[in-house]
Image (spheres, rainbow, N blue to C red):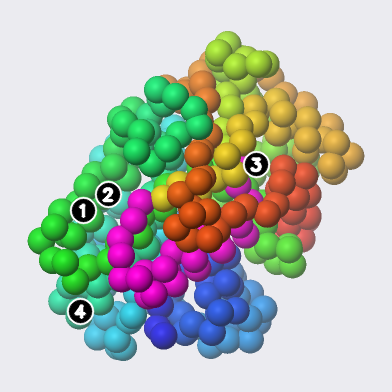
Amino acid sequence: MNILVTGGLGFIGSHVVIELINKGYKVDIIDNLSNSDIETLENLKNFTKSDIAFHKVDLRNLSELISVFKLKQFDAVIHFAGLKAVGESVVKPQIYYENNVLGTINLINAMQIHDCKNIVFSSSATVYGDPESLPIKESARVHAINPYGENKLIIEKYLHYILEADSNWCVGILRYFNPVGAHKSHLFGEKPLGIPNNLMPIICRVAAGKIKKLEIFGNDYQTQDGTGVRDYIHVVDLSHGHICALEYIFRKSQSFTINLGTGKGYSVMEMVEKFEKVNDLKIPFVYAPRRKGDIDECYANVDLARELLGWNSVYDLTDMCKDSWESYKKLYL
């Protein structure tokens, strides 16, 4: 089967490409390289010993996107492409709506034209906003409180309207919590261009001496140690979740919305302390003001993923911290 992966050279996308090829799927990648590295493509080809077709295309360009679909008949699309930083989305909302929402609308149009009606969409726990109760179930109220989360929620609603209009579509919506870690080969990891926005790549840069101190945004949250609590999930576990979602669509021809997390919350300080212990390093830090759009706690109820997809997370916080640092050293040092 032919699978098109948008944003396939990014952090999560590249890991999912590996799992797809391991499962025998043929993969095409679309990526505009705005926050990814073309070297990742060669690494993927060498590691998987597979001839992966690559298309440098921006989803905002509908004509170029349609030209990719003319090349072959795709059985499904896994859609990662988009900007992904909460803080940046608050500062640059217009760019986020243009890239994430318009890009997805163009993708769905291209799929519709070429009768490819299976999609797994990379959504986010940010659609829940500040949760009313924990752990968060898929049935919880959705109430995004920043432009990034609102982007994801708009796209989710749009996909539901597509389903209502045409029952031949199958849509798998995966609400991620906080992906970290790296492939066990340590040849692939989180390689943001420019200044990273997520916690783990910043910790790694501090550990490498490229940043003097980690800024922890807020120490007055209503949590055990005052720092924000999140559900961190190993990217390999997350990748396996995509395979389970894709195969459920092929097997059942049913749509769904599912959380992918571990079901456990860890604070920023717990993550820092675990990273220090696992890798025998010290991470100097300072407290900084809270960022607009951040919340106290967020972690998943993952019962539905277990029941419907037969999926469960395997790796723990030790694996996440170890693999992140080993990958960073191999890729950067």
Magenta run includes residue 254: yes
Pointer 1: what residue? 160
Tell me which residue sits at (70%, 52%) in the image: 315
Tell me which corner region of the image, top left, top right, bottom left or bottom right, holds residue 268: top right
Residue 278, above or below 7: above
Compare marks 4 and 3 and give the one earlier in the sequence.
Answer: 4
Residue 256, horizontal then vertical, whole percent: 34, 56
- The answer to whether 326 appears left or right of 36 in the picture is right
Measured in 3D between alpha carbons, the distance from the residue under mark 2 to the one under mark 4, in whole angstroms, is 20 Å
Pointer 4: what residue? 115
Pointers 2 and 1 in contact (C-beta within 8 Å): yes
Pointer 2: what residue? 156
Tell me which residue sits at (76%, 60%) in the image: 330
Q: Using a 10 Å C-alpha cutoff, classify the residue at mark 4 as few (fewer than 14 neighbours), some (14 to 19) or many (20 or more).
A: some
Of the pair 243 and 275, the residue shown nearer to us: 243
Q: The residue tagged with tag 2: helix, strand or loop?
A: helix
Amino acid type of the residue that numbered disc 4 sits on in the rendered structure: Asp
Q: Using a 10 Å C-alpha cutoff, classify the residue at mark 3 as few (fewer than 14 neighbours), some (14 to 19) or many (20 or more).
A: many
